[in-house]
């Protein structure tokens, strides 16, 4: 299927590894010009080189700490300097610190707020005006199943990722008339470093190995397995396509059936 996005410019945040990298590779495969960013320069250089070798397109890469407004501004400026525009914005970030309510202080909340919610607002502030002028744009935020089914010991993620959903729904209503869609993808348990770290953390709390925890996670899922990052990426690329031009303001879970609710 031709998704109609060949030649579009896609910026994917936190994309040197995991789901972010899988998204970048999927857009490269569709013929998009891609820009990636993350905090680790060495990982960015390695990822950019591997994407170029695999797909024949050279990504723009930028060192960017999502908690720093200046880094976000520099990233957007760099993408515009190299490609002239940003058609597709994929907001991704690492998960905030795990923890229960009484374990978390102001610093934890402030850092998570900037990382998870304010980074999305900042990137949108810098990209939406140009999308409005061109009357075309796609914004996809990678959230988590926690926006529909909160998980224990993830107070920060449960709270702030839900804020992203509220922001996205409101923004989608404001920009729909400009042919700009805003959606969220809520991944379930996915084979990334983040899920490994959570399994290690939970294992320490309950006295089990991380392997046992991961096995138990898989048993919670009707498909009896964790997702691969590329499976999350496929949903994101579809939401950026011309075929998805009438889908906006939605949160689509990609979870193997893990969420038990109807909505």
Image: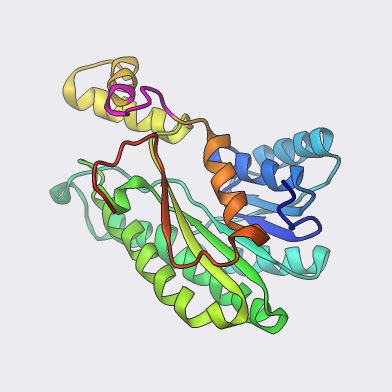
Q: Which image quadrant: the C terminus?
A: bottom left
Residue 101, can we see it?
A: yes
Q: Is residue 225 covered in magenta?
A: yes
Question: Closer to the camera, 61 or 217?
Answer: 217
Picture quadrant of residue 111: bottom left
Residue at the far left: name it.
102
State the image coordinates of residue 104 (x, y, percent, origin top left): 21, 51
State the image coordinates of residue 219 (x, y, percent, origin top left): 29, 22
Q: Is residue 244 covered in magenta?
A: no
Compared to 59, does 160 lie above or below?
A: below
Question: Closer to the camera, 136 or 38?
Answer: 136
Tell me which segment is drawn in magenta: 218-226
Left or right of 125 on screen, residue 223:
left
Q: Residue at x 64, y 70 (%)?
A: 137
Residue at the far right: name it.
56
Question: Closer to the camera, 80 or 5?
Answer: 5
Question: How many numbered markers are drawn?
Answer: 0
Q: How is the image coloured?
A: rainbow
Compared to 80, does 34 lie above or below?
A: above
Left or right of 148 on screen, residue 114:
right
Judged by its main secondary structure, the magenta piece is loop
State the image coordinates of residue 170 (x, y, percent, origin top left): 40, 76
State the image coordinates of residue 29 (x, y, percent, origin top left): 75, 42
Q: Residue at x 49, y 65 (%)?
A: 120
Picture quadrant of residue 62: bottom right
Left or right of 7 on screen, residue 252:
left
Residue 157, can we see it?
A: no
């Amino acid at each position: 299927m031709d998704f109609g996005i060949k030649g579009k410019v896609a910026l994917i945040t936190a994309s040197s590894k995991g789901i972010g990298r899988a998204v970048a590779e999927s857009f490269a495969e569709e013929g998009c010009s891609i820009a990636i960013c993350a905090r680790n320069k060495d990982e960015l250089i390695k990822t950019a080189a591997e994407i170029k070798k695999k797909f024949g397109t050279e990504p723009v890469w930028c060192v960017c700490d999502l908690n720093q407004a200046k880094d976000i501004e520099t990233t957007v400026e760099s993408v515009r300097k190299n490609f002239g525009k940003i058609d597709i914005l994929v907001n991704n970030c690492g998960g905030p610190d795990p923890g229960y309510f009484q374990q978390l202080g102001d610093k934890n909340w402030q850092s998570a707020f900037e990382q998870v919610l304010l980074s999305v607002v900042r990137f949108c502030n810098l990209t939406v005006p140009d999308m409005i002028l061109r009357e075309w744009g796609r914004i996809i935020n990678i959230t988590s199943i926690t926006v529909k089914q909160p998980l224990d010991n993830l107070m920060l993620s449960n709270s702030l990722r839900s804020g992203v959903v509220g922001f996205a729904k409101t923004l989608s209503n404001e920009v729909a008339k400009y042919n700009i869609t805003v959606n969220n993808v809520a991944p379930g348990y996915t084979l990334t470093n983040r899920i490994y770290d959570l399994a290690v953390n939970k294992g320490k709390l309950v006295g089990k190995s991380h392997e046992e925890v991961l096995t138990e996670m898989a048993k919670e899922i009707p498909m009896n397995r964790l997702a691969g990052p590329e499976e999350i990426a496929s949903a994101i690329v579809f939401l950026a396509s011309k075929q998805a031009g009438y889908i906006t303001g939605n949160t689509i879970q990609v979870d193997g059936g893990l969420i038990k609710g109807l909505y």
